[in-house]
Image (cartoon, coloured by chain):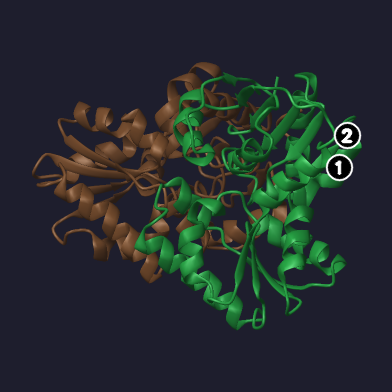
Chain colours: A brown, B green
Amino acid sequence: MPTIGVFDSGFGGLTVLRELLKVLPGVDYLYFGDTARLPYGSKSAHTVAKYAISSTHFLEQQGAEMLVIACNTATALALDDIRAASSVPVIGVVEPGAKRAAELSKTGKAAVIATEATIASHAYQKALAQHGIQATEKACPLLVPLVEEGWVEHPVTEQVAHIYIDEMFRNGGQGADVLVLGCTHYPLIRPLLRRVAPPQVQIVDSAESTANQVAQQVKNCATAKTGTLRCYATDSVEKFRRLGSRFLGREIENIELIDIEK
Amino acid sequence: MPTIGVFDSGFGGLTVLRELLKVLPGVDYLYFGDTARLPYGSKSAHTVAKYAISSTHFLEQQGAEMLVIACNTATALALDDIRAASSVPVIGVVEPGAKRAAELSKTGKAAVIATEATIASHAYQKALAQHGIQATEKACPLLVPLVEEGWVEHPVTEQVAHIYIDEMFRNGGQGADVLVLGCTHYPLIRPLLRRVAPPQVQIVDSAESTANQVAQQVKNCATAKTGTLRCYATDSVEKFRRLGSRFLGREIENIELIDIEK
């Protein structure tokens, strides 16, 4: 079973790791959060590609034999660049989410919410089009800071989600029967988004779909009995421990501070 | 008249530059926004100091003869480190804001709102204590993303500001008659904050106070007839132009993309 390197700009990718731990518990994981340079969601493709490649190189140096790009923005803007710069298999979060949405949709129409940079790249729209699905996309830049403030069941978050989602379903999103969560922070407000989205709409979580695809890909490998987890962060270990546990859903013990810009 | 280098993590410092242009229009300015690595407000002192020093070095190399640290977080966490690493005079935004608050307060009590990192450093509390003023501080992490979303006159922003400010004036802030805006984004929602804050409270904008202190410091220098402005950004020039003009209050022409991590 290969050592799996999971990369994200910060804490959000821990929701992907959480799903991976459900389907592949007996694996050695390395998690890298580029917390000094987060967030990627508001940055340019050039900058995101540069940061992502330096981070995934680090994971390969640490022994990662497969890379999961657990950051929607990095996947959307830089997956080809990361693949070209890597010597191990690389799986992003966009394609598994798009594939799952296509399996579920009956109307052939999907709605996608994500960061500003992911939406501007139209990565989901393109991936869904490959599966014959027409997509309406909406950037929701306030949802990440609201989740990080811990307001996951707060009336302000519900109001903001309503503004974004109502607007999307009014403008182009009519007929969509699937809502893709195209940002790793959004699973934390899934119950709230469930209330806000129209009732006939099914929710697809890219974190879940990606974990299933990874499991599929390594299903023929031998499984160890117990897996390990090591985390690396480029900023405060204390903050990583505190915020990270909310995303992972359990305490995080093994965190190391590293300087990627040396 | 010295060339003044203005440094910020992103666009917010343009509110300080805007005030500088009012009181010192005939000066050559260099503005540096470290937009690839923003925001600083949620990062550790170590990371903020490292980023700020590499950025101010760059401004000195470009000819800055005086540095204005127009970022509350960088001033709060790294002013001493920046001063130690610089060969020109360095002015931060915290002390001028604290001084102005002390001049205005009759009750000897002030309230301060700022980013998570600025509040955690207690830089304003310490600076105000030097002037005999007791401070209550409150981190308002959602206000920056709300301003950047352009929701400067939006009911959600008013509601969020109410939650933060009411909580502060209930818990420890009773009797404060001055509210210090300890983040460069907040001047953009000053009218909204005016409505939300108790009516007897006067608002102190650190951007304004800092510009006045810089003017004081260079008042004996000869003034040129016209000044110039050059801007440098570490991420998208297009985004700097678009967002920056909102903060500066006018169009920005001269922007150059630079790579500080080389």
Q: At 42% from the left edge and 59% from the top edge, which residue is drawn?
A: A188
**Which label is found at residue B81?**
1
Residue ID at (58%, 20%)? B257
> Which residue, as the protein is rendered here, is positioned at the far top?
A84
Host chain of mark 1:
B
Residue A233 in sight here: yes
Residue type at the position of mark 1: Asp
SS of the residue under disc 2: helix
Q: Residues within 10 Å of mark 1 (few under 14, many from 20)?
A: some
Residue name at image x 25 percent, y 62 percent: A196
Query: Can you identify the residue that label 2 sits on?
Result: B85
Q: Nearer the viewer, residue A123 or B113?
A: B113
Say which of A138 and B229 sits in front: B229
Closest to the observer, B31 or A56 = B31
Q: Amino acid at mark 2?
A: Ala
Of all chains, the one bearing label 2 is B
Query: Whole-percent x and y of residue A170?
Result: 15, 49
